[in-house]
Amino acid sequence: MDRRNLVGLGVIAVASAAVVGLTGPAYDAVQALIIKNAAGGAETEVVTGEAQGFGGTVKAEVTVAGDKIIALTLTGEGETPEIGGAAMTALTEAITANQSLDGVDAVSGATITSDAVFAAIRSAMGGAEAPANTEETDAYEGETSVVTGEGDGYGGKIQAEVTLSEDGTIVGLSLTGDDETPSIGGAALETLKTAILENGSLDGVDAVSGATWTSNGVFDAIRSAMGEDLGGESGGEKAEMTAAGLSHGLGFYSTGRVGPGKDDQGTGVYSFNEVVAYVLFDNDGRILDLEVDQLEVATPNYDGSGMPDFTGFPGQSYSEDKDHDGKVDGTAVQTEDSYLAQVDAWKTKRERGNTYKLDSGSWEQEMDIFESAFLGFTADEVKEWYETYCSDLNGRPLHGTSDKEEDIAKYEALTDLEKTGLDGIAGATMSLNDAHGNIIGAIERAYENRRPVEAEKVAKIGLGFTNTGRLGPGKDDQGTGVYSFNTQAVGAAYDADGKIIALYTDVMEVATPNYDGEYMPNLTGFPGQSYNADENHDEKVDAVLDQTDDSFLAQVDTWKTKRERGDTYKLDAGTWADEMDIFEAAFAGMTADEVSQWYETYCSDVNGRPLHGTSENEEDIKKYEAFTDEDKAALDAVSGATMSLKDPHGDILGAIVDSWTKAKDTNITIE
């Protein structure tokens, strides 16, 4: 049933409730007058009949004049109010308006109740009662078959046992989902069972509002039982896109989040979020394809079991909810070992997969819907779409379901065509710009950072991540350690043979505030934590910074990637961006495996730097001297690059490999 049908049934139900509420002599007199006029002077007779509906007996009290039905009262206390009850109201109006059953169709989504109404009226008027339909399979007299399937619900697996008639109609259904929340998912199972059995199929049955995940699990379980492929892949080649020119860009956007709320001990819950967008554009700046992912890291008192967490830098501590039951179990104290382990365990929202559930699906599934919707848009048009169709309060798409006055006013101001346009993202409800992450901002930055790409055809794109913790360099003059964490992101375009067409690499490094580098992004910790600070970058501690809500948000807001730091991030042979560009150019034409092989052959086993014959380390000298002249000549391609591709400062190699592991199909031909 679509939204228009739901609205229509809602109006009918309200009207019916208003009529039923009128009682007394005056009302009875009006009704008698209406019946008399409808009879046109003919004698009237009241007859009754009944038939088996979906939930029980449906009774009909029919006032007839000759062969005309001039008044009708239907009762069916066992029918579901929102489906069967609404259907009886709709049928009462249709039948009395028509003065017969001829030409009156069953209400879509309530076939069993409708058939019971028709049978009860025929019975009352002396006709044969039609065979009743119930959810019990013995009510169907033909051959049946029973099939089973399962789907992923909100809390676990949902099993469906489906009884089918000879023509494939669903005549019996049993749904089991022991891990669904009783008040939401459990109730949705009952509602859907009723709707599906009344309809005899999934056609026209909508997800239950507020229980979309459970609903989709039911639909998948039934489709699986009936032999449908749930793989999600069409199996066919993606439609070809032809582009005039090609460029690609990578955009980072970092935000701090205060909340959600506090733990049971009154300590705040916080997180920081890094959204990364890898986008391919044509010469007009229109999006040819994109991949967006996000790393969210929260305090360890966050009660979500799949959330990456961060106690702080070594020496810091924070409240901890180990079993994720909403209650603090103790205080976690960060050590160097636990620090490295925490950072190494961080996963992006795509990597968290189905463990990151939203209203209509996983984060990954909702993001895929947005990505498909934005194809062909420019970055400015994406922003304009967002400003037109999303809430000004929370950045979520306006689907007409919000109870906020400002959202309601904005939605009602949309034209019918604009509201229809939102149907394309009906399965996406998450925010595109809030403290949880600025996805719009990341796409805009990808456009601002775009670079031209020489290619004839792109077959796949990928966005890879790695996270590394770093101990050092050293300690400050007070003996307190210096630490940093690094998030590496690589956007990659591949050809049909899996060879790299172009790479776009960037790294976000965030250090303790006692790091003496002037332009290093820093984090004191979460609000309530403190750390030594070298504010004038003279290698001497000037103060101890105490983190507040405001300073936390301000610090995260100022974070810049290594590319964004530009000429301020100097290495031996140039800036970080200069050296990274050299590696990216050298790796074009290789597969991800060949890049790994190149690294193992030509880079130090000690620190991951290319071996240019300048290292004084014995192991490096031995490895370099074993090179042939051809090997040494091959290193000339990266002669201007000396930085490591894999060390605690950042696992760039791993991010390149990850971009291939996660690569998705595309089909772009460049003119």
Image: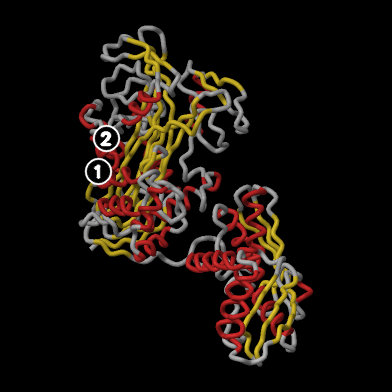
User: Quick one: which residue is furthest to the top in this view?
Assistant: 478
Position of residue 191 in the picture relative to residue 349 (left or right): right
Where is residue 404 drawn, in percent x and y?
Answer: 43, 47
Residue highlighted by disc 2: 563
Name the residue beneath numbered marker 1: 449
Residue 279 drawn above or below residue 318: below
Q: Do the residues labelled 1 and 2 touch (CB within 8 Å)?
A: yes
- N-term-proximal mark, 1 vs 2: 1
Q: Which of 84 and 371 is in front in this view?
A: 84
- Disc 1 from disc 2: Cα separation: 10 Å
Judged from this view, the residue extending furthest toward the right is 138
**How many numbered marks does the figure carry?**
2
Q: Where is residue 669 in the image (x, y as percent from the top left)?
A: 29, 62
Q: Is residue 142 above or below residue 242?
A: below
**Image quarter hosting the N terminus:** bottom right
User: What element does badge 1 sit on?
Assistant: loop
Residue at position x 36%, y 27% from top?
Answer: 510
Q: What residue type is labelled 2?
A: Arg
Q: Judge left or right: residue 473 versus residue 359.
A: left
The picture quadrant where one finds residue 283 is bottom left
Residue 622 visible, this angle: no
Q: Can residue 353 be seen in this view?
A: yes
Identify the residue at image location x=46%, y=40%: 348
